[in-house]
Image (cartoon, helix red, strand yellow):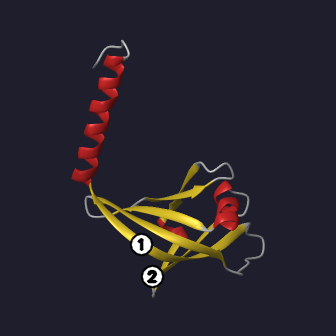
Amino acid sequence: MNAIRLSTVNEEGWPHSSLLSVGEVLALPNAKIRFAISARASTTANLLRDGRLTMVIPFEKGVCEMRMRVQQINQEVEGVPLTFFEAQIESIRHLLLRMLMSCLEKLSLCTNRKRYLHGGTSK
């Protein structure tokens, strides 16, 4: 596992994605996770404002998607501009790669069909 994708919601209500390395995340008992993000990052601003997070990690030929509620924890490291968070997992969904591929194939067929219907060529 190389990277963990975080998804938040920006001020306009649009999804915002960012990546964390495994070394920036700590799993705790009782379905809690701690992580650190740059204090100046858009993700930090989104979490401080909204408190919702989706974390996606590669897992057994697929991905594991966790929806969480996040709070800033008071932990400062002098000279290190990081904001520390603790997240409580609310739900977990495991998506197998073959399910994802099936969804992508269906999406591709729909995209090609729309292109054809609007006068474009289908590839």
Q: Considering only vertical position in the picture, is 120 above or below 63?
A: above
Q: Which residue is mark 1?
A: 91
Answer with the quarter of the image where residue 3 lies: bottom left
Q: CA distance from mark 2 to mark 1?
A: 10 Å
Q: Which amino acid, mark 2?
A: Ala
Q: Considering only vertical position in the picture, is 27 above or below 42?
A: below
Instruction: Name the spot of residue 17 as percent of width and height, x first.
Output: 54, 52
Element carrying mark 2: loop
Q: Considering only vertical position in the picture, is 79 above or below 62?
A: below
Q: Nearer the viewer, residue 121 or 58?
A: 121
Direction from residue 81 to residue 95 in the image, left or right: left
Instruction: Name the spot of residue 83 as percent of width and height, x first.
Output: 69, 70
Q: Considering only vertical position in the picture, is 89 above or below 38?
A: below
Query: Which quarter of the figure is the C terminus placed in?
Result: top left
Give neighbour class at mark 1: few <14, some 14-19, many 20+ (Cα, 10 Å).
Answer: few
Total number of numbered discs in the rendering = 2
Q: Which amino acid, mark 1?
A: Ser
Residue found farthest to the bottom:
29
Q: Nearer the viewer, residue 48 or 79?
A: 48
Q: Which residue is mark 2?
A: 31
The residue located at (55%, 54%) in the rendering is 18
Q: Nearer the viewer, residue 49 or 98?
A: 49
- Which of the two labelled residues, at mark 2 and mark 1, occupies the earlier sequence position? 2
Instruction: Name the spot of residue 42 as percent of width and height, x first.
Output: 67, 55
Instruction: Name the spot of residue 23 as percent of width and height, x first.
Output: 51, 69
Residue found farthest to the front:
117
Query: Which quarter of the figure is the N terminus placed in?
Result: bottom left
Give the label on residue 38, or none.
none
Direction from residue 45 to residue 95 in the image, left or right: left
- Front of the two marks 2 and 1: 1
